[in-house]
Image (cartoon, rainbow, N blue to C red):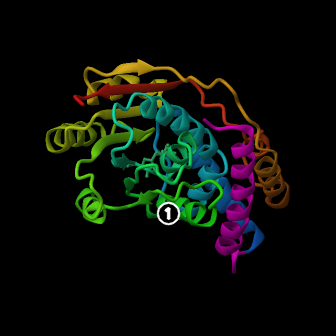
């Protein structure tokens, strides 16, 4: 669950990383160049509303994604993770997760926020994959510099075999497996995702498979995950992130980037009409 306190910490972490990334990206560039890059980035993300994937290889797109969509996705991931943690039969078993299309690692933050931090919690290994190095890199910067938001029993990036090896000294040899793909299905990768889901099912017999998307992609997602049921969000609270809202507004004022209103909107954790599909496997 994303509490007000966690949203506040997320807000602070985002401003810190966003400013650092902005300073890095703007070095040596003139104001008009920066205006152009930011405006192009906003335009690219604007296409998402029409189902067009953004240019995630562009570092400015990654930065603008982090400061707008990321907090919503963290809330979504925390909500879904909480449901899945609640239904685990054996919560003491280690968990290994493939996070397909991980972007800036919202799933990892959601998992962290959804479970309590008792030291005896079993470890979780997450293989977070994404074709965009820019998205993953920026997410990792937040992950590595925000210990207050991160569960240190969650190990980012191990392959299942490596994760199991790390646990070998412990008495638990079995590991539960989940597959998660949040808002990472498009026309272009629909078939590929379907075959990854099938292969994953055969190879690992996961206990949970979850696909999320916005309503535009629902048909695609249902095709990729046949037999899934719909979940609705349990936690209705929405939090506003005032610091990153101000940071974006200041960026707009400073650069006069367009569309200006994209930088003037309030950043919050409200996920617009999410489709959440869940297929549970045998325990
Ligand atoms: C809307 S973002 C979602 C990121 C993250 N899952 C989240 O919920 O914040 C979509 C992500 O899907 C990734 N993506 C695009 N095409 C992909 C593909 N063919 N395979 C895997 N990921 C892909 C993009 O690079 C991007 O990071």
Taking 184 as reference, is 27 left or right?
A: right
Task: Say which of 129 and 51 sits in front.
Answer: 129
Task: Say which of 170 and 72 sits in front.
Answer: 170
Taking 187 as reference, is 195 left or right?
A: left
Taking 220 as reference, is 81 left or right?
A: right
Relative image position of residue 229 (x, y in whole percent): 35, 19
Q: Magenta segment range?
A: 1-29
Q: How many marks?
A: 1
Q: Looking at the image, can residue 177 be seen?
A: yes
Residue lying at the far front in this picture: please name it: 171
Name the residue beneath numbered marker 1.
134
Vertical comparison of 251 with 224: above or below: below
Residue 47 falls inside the magenta stretch? no
10 Å neighbourhood of mark 1: few (<14), some, or many (≥20)? many
Taking 145 as reference, is 87 left or right?
A: left
Vertical comparison of 3 with 100: above or below: above
């Amino acid at each position: 669950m994303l509490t007000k306190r966690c949203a506040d910490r997320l807000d602070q972490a985002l401003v810190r990383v966003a400013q650092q990334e902005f300073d890095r990206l703007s070095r040596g560039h003139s104001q008009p160049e920066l205006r152009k890059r930011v405006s192009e980035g906003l335009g690219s993300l604007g296409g998402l509303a029409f189902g067009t994937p953004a240019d995630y290889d562009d570092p400015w797109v990654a930065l603008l994604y982090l400061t707008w969509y990321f907090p919503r996705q963290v809330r979504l991931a925390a909500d879904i993770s909480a449901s899945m943690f609640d239904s685990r039969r054996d919560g003491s078993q280690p968990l290994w997760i493939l996070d397909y299309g991980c972007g800036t690692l919202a799933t990892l933050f959601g998992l962290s926020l959804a479970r309590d931090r008792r030291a005896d919690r079993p470890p979780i290994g997450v293989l977070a994959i994404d074709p965009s190095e820019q998205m993953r890199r920026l997410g990792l910067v937040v992950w590595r510099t925000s210990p207050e938001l991160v569960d240190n029993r969650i190990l980012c990036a191990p392959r299942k075999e490596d994760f199991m090896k790390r646990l070998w000294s412990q008495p638990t040899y079995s590991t539960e497996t989940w597959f998660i793909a949040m808002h990472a299905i498009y026309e272009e990768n629909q078939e590929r995702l379907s075959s990854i889901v099938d292969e994953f099912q055969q190879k690992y017999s996961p206990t949970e498979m979850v696909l999320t998307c916005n309503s535009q992609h629902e048909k695609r997602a249902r095709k990729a995950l046949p037999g899934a049921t719909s979940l609705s969000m349990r936690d209705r609270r929405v939090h506003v992130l005032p610091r990153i809202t101000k940071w974006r507004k200041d960026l707009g004022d400073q650069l006069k980037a367009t569309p200006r209103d994209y930088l003037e909107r309030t950043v919050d954790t409200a996920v617009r009409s999410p489709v959440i599909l869940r297929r549970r496997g045998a325990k």
